[in-house]
Amino acid sequence: MRFITDILTGKDNLTFDAARVMGVMGAGAYIVFWSAAVFHLGVFSAGDAAAYGTGLGLVMVAMSGAVRLKQEAEPERR
């Protein structure tokens, strides 16, 4: 549990960061939706793998960009 808290909180390890929480939720939802699509269709081709990797990469880049933009506004460690 401590590992997940460290991932989702800011510099002070007390305040949950909305950008990180939403990014992890978005990545998780992306994985669940792709898994459901593969289960439903039963096919996962090379083109699907490329699209999946590109989409998940964009979700991660958006999350890291949001965290970087608000870096100065994070509360400092006490």
Image (tube, grey):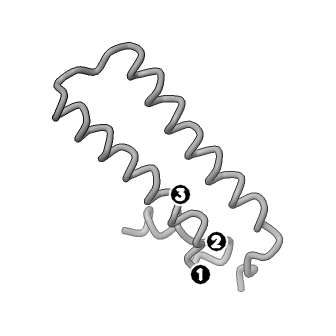
Q: Residue furthest right?
A: 72
> Where is 44 relative to 11, above or below?
above
Name the residue carrying label 2: 10
Name the residue carrying label 1: 15
Name the residue carrying label 3: 23
Q: Residue furthest front?
A: 41
**Mark 2 surroundings: few (<14), some (14-19) or many (≥20) residues within 10 A:** many
Disc on the earlier residue, 3 or 1: 1
* Element type where label 2 sits in the image: loop
Residue sitting nearer the eye, 55 or 68: 55
Residue at mark 2 to residue at mark 1: CA–CA distance: 6 Å
**Mark 3 surroundings: few (<14), some (14-19) or many (≥20) residues within 10 A:** many
Q: Residue furthest bottom?
A: 78
The residue located at (51%, 66%) in the rendering is 21
The residue located at (57%, 63%) in the rendering is 20
> Where is 78 relative to 31, above or below?
below
Residue 46: % across, % down: 38, 13
Dividing the picture into quarters, in which one does residue 77 lie?
bottom right
Residue at mark 2 to residue at mark 3: CA–CA distance: 14 Å
Comparing labels 3 and 1, the label whose residue is closer to the camera = 3
Comparing labels 2 and 3, the label whose residue is closer to the camera = 3
> Is residue 62 found left or right of 57 in the rendered image?
right
Q: Residue 25 got which mark?
A: none
Q: Amino acid at mark 2?
A: Gly
* Quadrant in which the C terminus appears: bottom right
**Mark 1 surroundings: few (<14), some (14-19) or many (≥20) residues within 10 A:** few
> Where is 68 relative to 57, above or below?
below
Q: Amino acid at mark 1?
A: Thr
Disc on the earlier residue, 2 or 1: 2
Residue 22: % across, % down: 51, 64
